[in-house]
Amino acid sequence: MQINISRLVRGEKTEWDAFVDRFSPVIYSAIRRTSLAHLGTANEDDLRDLMQKVFVRLVKDDFKLLKTYDSSRASLVTWLNLISRSASIDFLRRLTPRTVPIDEGAMEVSDPHAPTPSLPIDIPSRLLSPRQKLILHLLFDEEKSTGEIAGLLGIEEQTVRSMNHKALKKLRKFFKNENI
C-alpha cells in the first residue's frame, strides 16, 4: 500500500493507521539495531517506548518533522531509518553522564588477597529476569547510577535498588549452592 504523505499530514486517521501498520516494523528494527550496537542489549519495553517517541516526534508541532520528508532525496523507509536511528542515539546520549561523579566507595582500597575473576561467569539464562540483567549491566558494566537507570527505565530509584538487591541475592544463592 502506498502512503500518501499529504493526507497523512492533514491528519487523516485511516492514512495514519496505515502508516503506523506499515512502518512500525521499520522503526522498531532501526531502534533495535542501534540499541544493540551501542549497548549490546535491547530491552523490549524500552524499544517499544522509543518507537512510540519516534511516532510522537513525527507528528509533533503539526507534523513538522514529517513535512520535511522529501521523496526526491530518499525513500520513506530510508528516511524513517535515519529518524529512528537519530532518536535512538539521542536517547542513548542522555544516558551517558557528562561528568563523572566522585564515588566515595570507589576510593576504598580493595583487599589485595581477594580473588579476582579471570573468566566470564556462567549464569543460567533463566536465573535473572531480563530487567534484572539490564539493571546489573547498567550498574556494573556501564557504571550508571541508580538515578540514571531509573530515568532511563522510567521507574523509581528505589525500584532500581530493590531489583539490584533481589538479583544479587539470587546470584549469591545460586553460587553458594554451586560451591564457587
Image (cartoon, helix red, strand yellow):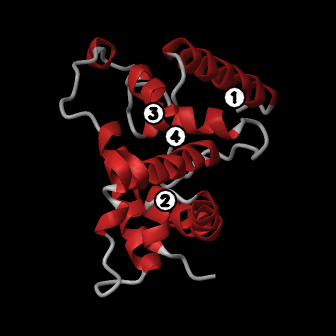
**Which residue is disc 2 drawn over?**
31
Density class for disc 4 (Cα within 10 Å; few <14, some 14-19, many ≥20) is few
Distance Cα–Cα, label 2 vs label 3: 15 Å
The correct choice, above or below, for 153 with respect to 123 in the image is: above
The one nearer the camera, 51 or 68, is 68
Foreground mark, 3 or 4? 3
Give yes or no for contact between labels 2 and 3 (Cβ–Cβ under 8 Å): no
Disc 4, SS: loop
Q: Quadrant of residue 109?
A: top left
Distance Cα–Cα, label 1 vs label 2: 31 Å
Residue drawn at (54%, 76%) of the image = 3
**Which residue is disc 3 drawn over?**
152
Residue drawn at (70%, 33%) of the image = 180
Disc 2, SS: helix
Foreground mark, 1 or 4? 1
The correct choice, above or below, for 110 with respect to 75 in the image is: above
**Which residue is disc 1 drawn over?**
171
* Badge 3 or badge 4: first in the primary sequence: 4
* Badge 1 or badge 2: first in the primary sequence: 2
User: Looking at numbered disc 3 in the image, what kind of residue is underneath it?
Assistant: Leu
User: Looking at numbered disc 4 in the image, what kind of residue is underneath it?
Assistant: Pro
85 to the left or right of 17: left
Density class for disc 2 (Cα within 10 Å; few <14, some 14-19, many ≥20) is many
**Which residue is disc 4 drawn over?**
117
**Horizontal and vertical percent for residue 60?**
37, 47
Foreground mark, 1 or 2? 2
**Horizontal and vertical percent for residue 13?**
60, 57
Disc 3, SS: helix
Give yes or no for contact between labels 3 and 4 (Cβ–Cβ under 8 Å): no
* Badge 1 or badge 3: first in the primary sequence: 3
Distance Cα–Cα, label 3 vs label 4: 29 Å
